[in-house]
Image: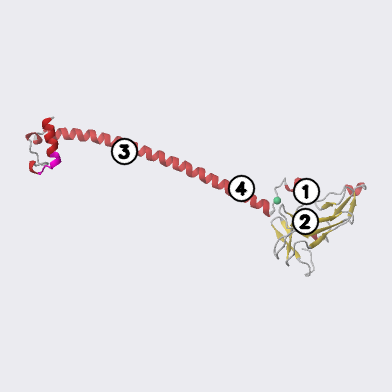
């Protein structure tokens, strides 16, 4: 890792995608953090125009900074779709500074938006790994999980209702069969003659309730 003066408010450290630049001191919104620098490439010169790497910073149609040199610590700054810094481009001076657009706390990773061209060329094909995109991905995954769970529970409830309905129908069918067989038994008992003499053991005449008396009376006059 590159050595950086302890006076600087940043250090190079491990980030999700490899290395990144992290604040070591509070950085105020609007503060210049670091300069993005390197040899200037002139697009009018064929050999310079042919140079390709991930650290090219286009200043104007003609001039591009080649930031791939080791001394350019700013090249460690990763892209973010919701950054805490921005590139402050001074085309006339052919200079680029990275400037805080939020208050940055020690330990925070410093990020800026690399711009649409870079995003399309390098990040979109592999999927942007910035915090914001990771959070979005996580949220989408959680939502998909919740949806799968919801559908599973719905299917389970449906299965349960089906099973309960089936059990009810079976129970109903069983009681019908029982009632039928009970009927046969009752007839069998009746046929043994015990109840035919009028004073069976179950309902002695003296213990009849008033309502049943009335009922028998009604039956008599019907
Ligand atoms: Zn992103």
Cα separation between marks 1 and 2:
15 Å
For the residue with label 2, is its CB less than 8 Å from the closest atom of ligand 1?
Answer: no
Q: Residue visible at 10% across and 44% down?
A: 207
Magenta stretch contains residue 209: yes
Which residue range is magenta in the image? Answer: 207-212
Residue topped by disc 4:
140
Residue topped by disc 3:
171
Mark 4 or 2: the one toward you? 2
Q: Main secondary structure of the magenta part?
A: helix
Cα separation between marks 4 and 2:
28 Å
For the residues labelled 2 and 3, say whether their Cβ atoms are less than 8 Å apart.
no
Q: Quadrant of the image for the N terminus?
A: bottom right
Residue topped by disc 2:
86
Cα separation between marks 3 and 4:
46 Å
For the residues labelled 1 and 3, say whether their Cβ atoms are less than 8 Å apart.
no
Earlier along the polypeptide chain: callout 1 or callout 3? 1
Q: Can you give x and y, in whole percent of width and height, for residue 35 in the image?
A: 83, 60
Closer to the camera, 46 or 198?
198
Residue topped by disc 1:
118
* Left or right: 25, with 43 as reference point: left
Earlier along the polypeptide chain: callout 4 or callout 2? 2
- Secondary structure under the numbered disc 1 in the rendered image: helix
Mark 2 or 3: the one toward you? 2
Q: Residue visible at 70% across and 62% down?
A: 108
């Amino acid at each position: 890792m590159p050595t950086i003066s302890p006076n600087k408010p940043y250090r190079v450290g491990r980030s999700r995608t490899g290395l990144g630049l992290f604040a070591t001191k509070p950085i105020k919104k609007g503060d210049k953090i670091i300069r993005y620098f390197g040899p200037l490439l002139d697009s009018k010169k064929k050999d310079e125009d042919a140079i390709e790497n991930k650290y090219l910073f286009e200043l104007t149609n003609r001039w591009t900074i080649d930031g791939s040199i080791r001394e350019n610590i700013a090249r460690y700054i990763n892209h973010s779709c919701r950054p805490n810094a921005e590139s402050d481009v001074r085309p006339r001076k052919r200079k680029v500074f990275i400037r805080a657009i939020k208050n940055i706390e020690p330990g925070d990773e410093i990020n800026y938006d690399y711009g649409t061209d870079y995003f399309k060329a390098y990040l979109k094909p592999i999927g942007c790994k910035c915090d914001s995109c990771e959070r979005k991905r996580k949220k989408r995954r959680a939502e998909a999980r919740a949806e799968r769970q919801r559908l599973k529970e719905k299917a389970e409830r449906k299965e349960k209702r089906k099973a309960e309905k089936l059990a009810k129908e079976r129970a109903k069918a069983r009681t019908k069969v029982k009632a039928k067989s009970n009927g046969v038994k009752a007839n069998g008992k009746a046929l043994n003659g015990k109840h035919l003499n009028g004073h069976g053991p179950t309902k002695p005449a003296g213990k009849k309730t008033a309502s049943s008396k009335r009922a028998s009376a009604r039956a008599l006059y019907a």
